[in-house]
Image (cartoon, helix red, strand yellow):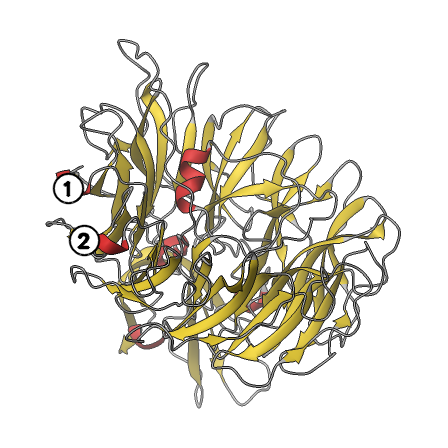
Amino acid sequence: MQHRRNSKGFLGVAVFVAFLSSVTLGATVEITDPASASPLAHRPPEGIHGYGPGAVVRERIALEPVRARPASGPESVGTKISGTPMAGAVRAFALTPDGSIAVYAADQDTLGVVELYSTPVGGTPNPIKISDASSSGVVRFQIAAGGTHVVFLTATDVYSVPVSGSTPVRLNTSAQAPVSALGVAPVGTAVVFFGVDTTFASGATEVYRATIGTPSSGVQLSDAGASLPAGNVVAADFSADGATLIYAADAAAAGVFQWHSVSLSATGPMSDVQLSSAMGFVSLGAISPDSSTLVYTADENVVGVSELFSIPLSGGTKSKLNPSMAGMGVTSLQISGNNRVAYLADQLTAGVHEVFGAQIGVASSGTRLNTPLGGIQSADVVTIGPDDMTVLYEADENTAGTHDLLSVLIDDTAAPTTLDAMTPPNNAGFFDGVGTPVVGSRAIYPVVGTQTDLYSVPFAGGSSSVRINHDLAGDAVHGAFIPPSATRLTAYGVGASGGITAMLFAAPIRGDLDPEQVNTTAGAGSTGVLGYAIPTDEARVVFMQDQDTVGTVELYSNELDSDGDTVGNATDNCPFVDNMSQGDVVFGQTVRADGSTFVWDSAVDARYVRGPLESVATLVTNATGTLIDAISFTDNTTPAAGAGLYYLFAVDCSARSYQTALGAEGARDTAGFP
């Protein structure tokens, strides 16, 4: 839950972003260019947010006008997986966690009436309508944890239905309608929604819990209307373990919101705990990864000054983490897994936003992490790396007016490191709602200048940045899909500045293979690509585009051949697919020796070394080789008397895997090859 600076460039149109915008990885994200400091918000971002992809906010589906259709269109690339005919257009889609099923919203049967469908991502298209006449007019949806059910919102009610199809179940009662927001717990079967107070007859907006598949199971958890009929719940979020909900409501004074916590298993209202005591407002709020603590911002000491606090979710001792605040306060925060928080604030100089780190629960522990800034200088968007110690941020720390990408340790034990220094007019930007994500060991970020490009660099430093996208020749990257887990590929959309997303590419995050265009280039008058995603197996890309008929947006799936060897990722034995984590690749228990022959479980491209096994400190290599599409290796060499031979095997695709040369990335060498 972070504030952003002014945007430059955006992905497609709001019809897709409104569905799938998220504070987590796994959504197509907007690129943001550093600009003037963000104004402070005086209430939390509205809606129900969550830890999983597809966090829910209040935006509704936008029904774009359908354009006149020509008699025919260009031949499509890939397979159209949405239904035919299409009365209107596909409005949004999401993938199940395993990437095998796409759920999409479309006014496919009746123009202007949006319904839900599910369809396999690969193979023969077979769309199934999973909403029905009583639940048509879908305005939001989210795939539940586990991927077996979809929860969706109509103009008045919230429903759940199996992805495979069945009769939708209405989760709220008539008295709780209209329902205005929904969210699915990150684990379990709980659904949270905003509905009308049924306990105190106040008319307030309250937060409810329901159970997937159980009709009319909504139970009111909040009590905003108990003492203030005009009070309303405006925001909510889950703890990572799915046991606790926090919500913001003005339950005591109109317009003055406070954070509360309540157990998701509560049987009714009046069991919540008020955690904040703001005089004017609360804005940011984040739960620690261990689900124990709320870290939030509020003006609890000086009206209008946003300071940083931590408090156990169950209530108890509160700590103000920053020392005195020179300016208006904290504008962004992120919690690490080691009980620390990184935040942006004008703590030392009013109007100059810098990076600070604090220890949760320790009063006044907020310490500046960047080198001193002043004047027009500022830092943008903190992101904590996967080691829970490295903080990534963009700042004009080195040269006023030019924002670089930097990293620093959250405990302030080392000076900042510049990961990529910019040359005017370029600036290191960030992704709206995500910041500077780290995938595997690499930070991904846009460089915004005369055009926008995507780059990656090791988040801990140690090597230079690389450009991910191809030479754009005057076009610009409009947005990117950031993978939800540490995989290899990203997708990005390209078009003329200020124009549509005309071309869609899949490319390695490490920039060591050529990007692969996966769609038919959108022509003049087209809507272009509106959304895209890569499933976790990275075998295909799924995208929305009016590819066959101008003005009719449909859903497509295209098989990827990321290494350009004419073998699709799904069946390629190169480690680009086989080694999903890009960790050390060793055969381990899958290699077995039968006499002079080594055998493994399936065909791979492998490299090997052999050497004499003697009592020496350093292994000596006397044979090396590459085995293409091999399932075994035989060597009848007789070792020297009194000695044996050692063999080391490793999967390798020469010039196609991330390790293009032995030793290029020491951490990715499969063994101690001499």
Judge whether 287 appears above or below 351 on screen: below
Q: Residue type at mark 1: give it.
A: Ser
Tag 2 near tag 1, CB within 8 Å: yes
Judge whether 574 appears above or below 31 on screen: below
Front-most of 656 and 559?
559
Residue 38: tell me if it is visible: yes
Q: Which mark is residue 134?
A: 1
Of mark 2 and mark 1, the one earlier in the sequence is 1
Q: Residue at x 70, y 30 (%)?
A: 450
The image quarter in which residue 297 lies: bottom right
Position of the C terminus, as image quadrant, is bottom right
Query: x and y percent of residue 328 in the render?
Result: 75, 58
The image quarter in which residue 171 lies: bottom left
Front-most of 534 and 157?
157
Tell me how far mark 2 sits from mark 1, CA to CA. 10 Å
Q: Secondary structure at mark 2?
A: strand
Judge whether 367 appears above or below 28 on screen: below
Query: x and y percent of residue 357 in the render?
Result: 70, 71
Position of the N terminus, as image quadrant, is bottom right
Q: Is residue 131 left or right of residue 638?
A: left
Query: x and y percent of residue 625 in the render?
Result: 44, 60
Residue 132: tell me if it is visible: no
Residue at the top extreme of this rendering = 71
Front-most of 530 and 244?
244
Q: Residue at x 60, y 56 (%)?
A: 443
Q: Residue type at mark 2: give it.
A: Arg
Crowd class of label 2 (few under 14; some 14 to 19; many from 20; radius 10 Å): many
Q: Residue at x 62, y 68 (%)?
A: 278
Q: Residue at x 77, y 74 (%)?
A: 323
